[in-house]
């Protein structure tokens, strides 16, 4: 009888620990807030919102923190992506998304639409701690745009 209770206790503990591990933010669910502009396939909206498919890994390679800043603080200004110009104002999501949600959506975007094949060698997934560290910067959307200009992207 004691062995039975030990087995049941082990199964319950295992289920609880699995539930805790799975309780983190789901990047695909968070991305539902993004696909009105960036589309479900990450291709963006011509002239307004740039693609994330094929472009996000390039941003990551230029500056690991840049995309997190865009999500936290927004982006306002004209940018060029793959020879196309986008005039946009992306609103900030820092007041609506938790650190783990931003990390999860970043990881989802970088793992989707073939982006995973373009990631730099040794890439590590984003963490909530990384996002939290950037949250204290208090940038404006225009300052984020200025940072992008320094990346010298084409």
Image: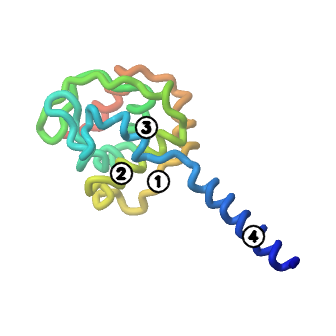
Q: CA distance from mark 3 to mark 4?
A: 40 Å
Residue furthest to the front: 1
Marking on residue 68? 3
Q: Give me the residue at 72% from left, 64% from top.
A: 12
Q: Are marks 1 and 3 in contact (CB under 8 Å)?
A: no
Dot 1 lies on which element? loop
The residue to which callout 2 is attached is: 110
Give the x, y percent position of residue 18. 62, 60
Task: Please name whichever residue, 137 or 55, is drawn nearer the observer in this view of the structure.
Answer: 55
Asked whether, in this view, residue 3 is left or right of residue 77, the answer is right
The residue to which callout 4 is attached is: 10
Q: CA distance from mark 4 to mark 1?
A: 31 Å
Q: CA distance from mark 2 to mark 3?
A: 12 Å
Give the x, y percent position of residue 27. 43, 46
Q: Earlier in the sequence, mark 2 or mark 1?
A: 2
Label 2 crowd bin: few (<14), some (14–19), many (20+), radius 10 Å: many
The residue to which callout 1 is attached is: 125
Residue furthest to the right: 2
Dot 4 lies on which element? helix
Q: Give me the residue at 24% from left, 24% from top.
A: 88
Q: CA distance from mark 2 to mark 1?
A: 9 Å
Quadrant where the N terminus lies?
bottom right
Q: CA distance from mark 2 to mark 4?
A: 36 Å
Q: Are marks 2 and 1 in contact (CB under 8 Å)?
A: yes
Quadrant of residue 114 in the image? bottom left
Q: Earlier in the sequence, mark 4 or mark 1?
A: 4
For the residues carrying marks 2 and 3, which lies nearer the camera in this image? Answer: 2
């Amino acid at each position: 009888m004691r062995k039975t209770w030990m087995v049941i206790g082990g199964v319950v503990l295992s289920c609880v620990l699995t539930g805790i591990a799975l309780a983190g933010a789901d990047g695909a669910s968070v991305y539902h807030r993004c696909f009105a502009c960036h589309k479900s396939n990450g291709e963006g909206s011509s002239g307004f919102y740039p693609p994330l498919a094929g472009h996000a890994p390039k941003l990551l390679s230029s500056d690991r923190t840049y995309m997190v800043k865009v999500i936290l603080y927004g982006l306002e200004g004209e940018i060029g992506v793959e020879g196309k110009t986008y005039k946009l104002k992306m609103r900030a999501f820092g007041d609506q998304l938790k650190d783990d949600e931003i990390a999860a959506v970043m990881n989802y975007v970088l793992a989707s639409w073939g982006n995973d094949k373009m990631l730099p060698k040794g890439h590590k997934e984003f963490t909530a701690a990384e996002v939290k560290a950037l949250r204290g910067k208090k940038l404006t959307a225009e300052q984020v745009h200025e940072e992008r200009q320094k990346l010298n992207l084409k």
